[in-house]
Amino acid sequence: MEILFDRFNLPEDIFKIVFPTERQQVVAKLLIKRIKDNSGTIGKTEMSMFATELHEGTLVDNRPDMDPFRRSEKPKISYNKRQFYDRILTPLKSMGMIDYDLYKKQYMLSDKFNKSMIKIGLLWLREIR
């Protein structure tokens, strides 16, 4: 996955930098919110249930940062299950935002993304010297 950004117009939301479409941003935010609400970890079964809720269109967008004037009722989000795994979960795992423990079979929030960004910055400093 590639991250392209303009440092002069950097958005406040990390999801706007990482995901190209608004729909992907919303689904990623809902996933991260679900993991945070579950004390920072979520099991493989719960992840599958989340993907199924998305696929069936029964997942309700109840984010607190949603504009209350934009929509009068909380919309239901629909997203293909396979596309969720390919376009949302896999990039989050590969960038280090979410980690998967193979033994516990749990997904957890990770700070590896931050460490990778620091490493990229150090690589750039080494290049310009």
Image (spheres, rainbow, N blue to C red):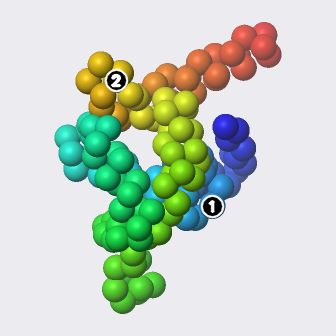
Location of residue 54 in the rendering, given as x and y in whole percent from the top left corner: 42, 62
Measured in 3D between alpha carbons, the distance from the residue under mark 2 to the one under mark 1, in whole angstroms, is 29 Å
Give the mark, 2 or 1, whose residue is nearer the N terminus. 1
Q: Please name the residue shown 72% across and 11% down the image.
A: 126
Viewer-proximal residue among 109 and 122: 109
Q: Please name the residue shown 29% across and 42% down the image.
A: 45
Location of residue 27 in the rendering, given as x and y in whole percent from the top left corner: 46, 58
Q: Relative to 66, is 126 above or below?
A: above
Q: In the displayed structure, does residue 121 sit left or right of residue 68?
A: right
Q: Please name the residue shown 42% across and 34% down the image.
A: 98
Location of residue 81 in the rendering, given as x and y in whole percent from the top left corner: 49, 55
Q: In the displayed structure, does residue 105 sit left or right of residue 66?
A: left
User: Which residue is denoted by mark 2 in the rendering?
Assistant: 101
Viewer-proximal residue among 127 and 85: 85
User: Which residue is denoted by mark 1 in the rendering?
Assistant: 21
- Neighbor class of circle 1 (other Cα within 10 Å; few <14, some 14-19, many 20+) is few
The tag on residue 10 is none
Kind of residue indicated by mark 1: Thr
The answer to which image quadrant residue 106 occupies is top left
Q: Looking at the image, which residue sits at the far right?
A: 128
Q: Looking at the image, which residue sits at the far bottom?
A: 72
Location of residue 61 in the rendering, given as x and y in whole percent from the top left corner: 36, 70
